Image (spheres, grey):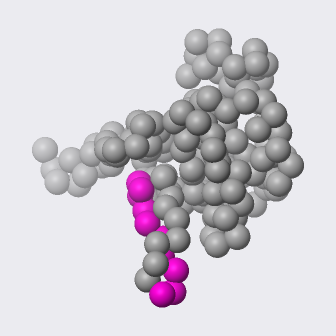
Protein backbone atom coordinates (compact mmCIF):
# COMPACT_ATOMS: atom_id res chain seq x y z
CA UNK A 1 0.00 0.00 0.00
CA UNK A 2 1.19 3.53 -0.73
CA UNK A 3 2.47 5.63 2.16
CA UNK A 4 -0.03 8.42 1.52
CA UNK A 5 -2.90 5.92 1.71
CA UNK A 6 -1.62 4.61 5.07
CA UNK A 7 -1.42 8.18 6.41
CA UNK A 8 -4.94 8.94 5.19
CA UNK A 9 -6.37 5.79 6.81
CA UNK A 10 -4.52 6.44 10.07
CA UNK A 11 -5.76 10.03 10.15
CA UNK A 12 -9.39 8.96 9.68
CA UNK A 13 -9.23 6.43 12.54
CA UNK A 14 -8.44 9.07 15.14
CA UNK A 15 -6.09 8.79 18.09
CA UNK A 16 -6.47 7.13 21.45
CA UNK A 17 -5.89 9.35 24.48
CA UNK A 18 -4.98 8.18 27.97
CA UNK A 19 -5.32 10.14 31.20
CA UNK A 20 -5.11 9.38 34.89
CA UNK A 21 -8.24 11.49 35.40
CA UNK A 22 -11.57 9.67 34.94
CA UNK A 23 -13.52 10.36 31.73
CA UNK A 24 -10.80 12.62 30.26
CA UNK A 25 -9.08 10.05 28.02
CA UNK A 26 -12.35 8.47 26.94
CA UNK A 27 -13.91 11.84 26.08
CA UNK A 28 -10.88 13.01 24.10
CA UNK A 29 -10.76 9.71 22.22
CA UNK A 30 -14.48 9.92 21.42
CA UNK A 31 -14.11 13.48 20.11
CA UNK A 32 -11.07 12.59 18.00
CA UNK A 33 -12.74 9.49 16.55
CA UNK A 34 -15.75 11.51 15.44
CA UNK A 35 -13.73 14.55 14.29
CA UNK A 36 -10.10 13.49 13.59
CA UNK A 37 -7.53 16.13 14.46
CA UNK A 38 -9.89 18.28 16.53
CA UNK A 39 -8.28 17.41 19.89
CA UNK A 40 -5.07 19.35 20.45
CA UNK A 41 -4.13 17.90 23.82
CA UNK A 42 -5.11 16.33 27.12
CA UNK A 43 -4.18 17.52 30.64
CA UNK A 44 -2.35 20.64 29.48
CA UNK A 45 -0.76 22.62 32.33
CA UNK A 46 -0.97 26.43 32.21
CA UNK A 47 1.52 28.52 34.15
CA UNK A 48 1.59 32.12 35.37
CA UNK A 49 4.38 34.51 34.41
CA UNK A 50 6.43 33.62 37.50
CA UNK A 51 6.42 29.94 36.62
CA UNK A 52 3.78 28.96 39.18
CA UNK A 53 1.08 26.55 38.06
CA UNK A 54 -2.12 28.41 37.22
CA UNK A 55 -4.58 25.74 36.07
CA UNK A 56 -4.90 22.81 33.72
CA UNK A 57 -7.07 22.12 30.70
CA UNK A 58 -8.48 18.61 30.67
CA UNK A 59 -9.23 18.45 26.92
CA UNK A 60 -8.12 21.17 24.51
CA UNK A 61 -9.74 21.29 21.08
CA UNK A 62 -9.26 23.77 18.24
CA UNK A 63 -12.17 25.96 19.38
CA UNK A 64 -12.68 25.19 23.05
CA UNK A 65 -11.22 24.11 26.38
CA UNK A 66 -13.15 21.36 28.13
CA UNK A 67 -13.11 20.95 31.90
CA UNK A 68 -14.12 17.45 33.02
CA UNK A 69 -15.51 16.62 36.47
CA UNK A 70 -16.10 12.95 37.16
CA UNK A 71 -17.65 12.76 40.61
CA UNK A 72 -18.36 16.03 42.37
CA UNK A 73 -18.81 19.35 40.65
CA UNK A 74 -16.91 21.34 43.25
CA UNK A 75 -15.18 24.38 41.79
CA UNK A 76 -16.40 23.67 38.25
CA UNK A 77 -18.01 27.10 37.97
CA UNK A 78 -14.86 28.85 39.22
CA UNK A 79 -12.60 26.85 36.90
CA UNK A 80 -14.77 27.56 33.86
CA UNK A 81 -14.94 31.30 34.64
CA UNK A 82 -11.16 31.34 35.11
CA UNK A 83 -10.65 29.59 31.74
CA UNK A 84 -12.99 32.13 30.14
CA UNK A 85 -10.81 34.99 31.46
CA UNK A 86 -7.40 33.59 30.50
CA UNK A 87 -8.14 31.94 27.15
CA UNK A 88 -9.63 33.00 23.85
CA UNK A 89 -11.24 29.60 23.39
CA UNK A 90 -14.73 28.84 24.61
CA UNK A 91 -14.79 27.04 27.99
CA UNK A 92 -17.07 24.01 28.15
CA UNK A 93 -17.90 21.85 31.15
CA UNK A 94 -18.54 18.12 31.14
CA UNK A 95 -19.92 16.74 34.39
CA UNK A 96 -22.14 13.64 34.31
CA UNK A 97 -23.13 14.12 37.97
CA UNK A 98 -24.01 17.83 37.87
CA UNK A 99 -27.35 18.90 39.30
CA UNK A 100 -29.81 21.04 37.40
CA UNK A 101 -29.33 23.98 39.82
CA UNK A 102 -25.55 24.00 39.39
CA UNK A 103 -25.93 23.74 35.62
CA UNK A 104 -28.29 26.73 35.54
CA UNK A 105 -25.87 28.86 37.61
CA UNK A 106 -23.07 28.18 35.16
CA UNK A 107 -25.29 28.79 32.13
CA UNK A 108 -26.10 32.28 33.48
CA UNK A 109 -22.46 33.21 32.83
CA UNK A 110 -22.79 32.10 29.20
CA UNK A 111 -20.85 28.85 29.64
CA UNK A 112 -22.10 25.54 28.27
CA UNK A 113 -22.15 22.48 30.54
CA UNK A 114 -23.02 18.97 29.39
CA UNK A 115 -23.97 15.84 31.30
CA UNK A 116 -23.93 13.59 28.24
CA UNK A 117 -20.73 13.02 26.26
CA UNK A 118 -22.66 12.48 23.02
CA UNK A 119 -24.36 15.88 23.43
CA UNK A 120 -20.94 17.47 23.97
CA UNK A 121 -19.48 15.80 20.86
CA UNK A 122 -22.53 16.90 18.83
CA UNK A 123 -22.02 20.48 20.04
CA UNK A 124 -18.35 20.40 19.03
CA UNK A 125 -19.41 19.23 15.57
CA UNK A 126 -21.93 22.07 15.34
CA UNK A 127 -19.20 24.47 16.46
CA UNK A 128 -16.90 23.13 13.72
CA UNK A 129 -19.57 23.52 11.03
CA UNK A 130 -20.68 27.01 12.17
CA UNK A 131 -17.51 28.78 13.37
CA UNK A 132 -18.92 32.30 12.99
CA UNK A 133 -22.39 31.72 14.45
CA UNK A 134 -23.16 33.05 17.87
CA UNK A 135 -22.91 30.30 20.51
CA UNK A 136 -26.44 31.07 21.76
CA UNK A 137 -27.93 30.02 18.42
CA UNK A 138 -27.15 26.38 19.30
CA UNK A 139 -30.17 24.79 20.98
CA UNK A 140 -29.05 23.53 24.36
CA UNK A 141 -30.74 20.21 24.99
CA UNK A 142 -29.88 17.61 27.59
CA UNK A 143 -30.80 14.14 26.42
CA UNK A 144 -31.12 12.90 30.01
CA UNK A 145 -34.20 15.04 30.46
CA UNK A 146 -35.87 13.13 27.65
CA UNK A 147 -35.89 16.07 25.26
CA UNK A 148 -34.74 15.31 21.73
CA UNK A 149 -34.21 17.28 18.56
CA UNK A 150 -32.43 16.71 15.27
CA UNK A 151 -28.89 17.04 16.68
CA UNK A 152 -29.48 14.67 19.62
CA UNK A 153 -29.89 11.22 18.08
CA UNK A 154 -28.29 9.03 20.77
CA UNK A 155 -31.44 9.11 22.90
CA UNK A 156 -33.25 7.41 20.04
CA UNK A 157 -30.44 4.91 19.54
CA UNK A 158 -29.06 6.50 16.38
CA UNK A 159 -25.64 8.08 15.92
Front residue (pair 102, 88): 102
| Residue at position x 63%, y 70% in the image | 87
Spot occupied by residue 100 in the image (x, y as percentages of width and height): 78, 30
Q: Which residue is at the front of the view, 141 or 5?
A: 141
The residue positioned 65% from the left and 21% from the top of the image is: 153
Q: Residue furthest left?
A: 1
Q: In this image, 121 relative to 103: left or right?
A: left
Residue 120 in sight here: no
Quadrant in which the N terminus appears: top left
Tell me what residue is drawn at x 55 percent, y 41 percent: 69
Count all numbered tags in the image, as a single digit. Answer: 0
In the displayed structure, 84 sits above or below 154; it is below
Of 59 and 5, nearer the camera is 59
> Can residue 22 be seen by looking at this rendering?
yes
Q: Is residue 73 magenta?
A: no
**Residue 158 place in picture, x, y as percent:** 58, 16
Q: Is residue 129 above or below residue 131?
A: above
Membership of 48 in magenta stretch? yes
Q: Is residue 48 above or below residue 113?
A: below
Amino acid sequence: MFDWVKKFIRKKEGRTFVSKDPFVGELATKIDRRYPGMVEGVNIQLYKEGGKKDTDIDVATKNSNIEVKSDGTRHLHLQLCHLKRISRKEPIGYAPQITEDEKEKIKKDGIKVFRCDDCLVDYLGWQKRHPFCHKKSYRDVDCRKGKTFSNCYHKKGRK
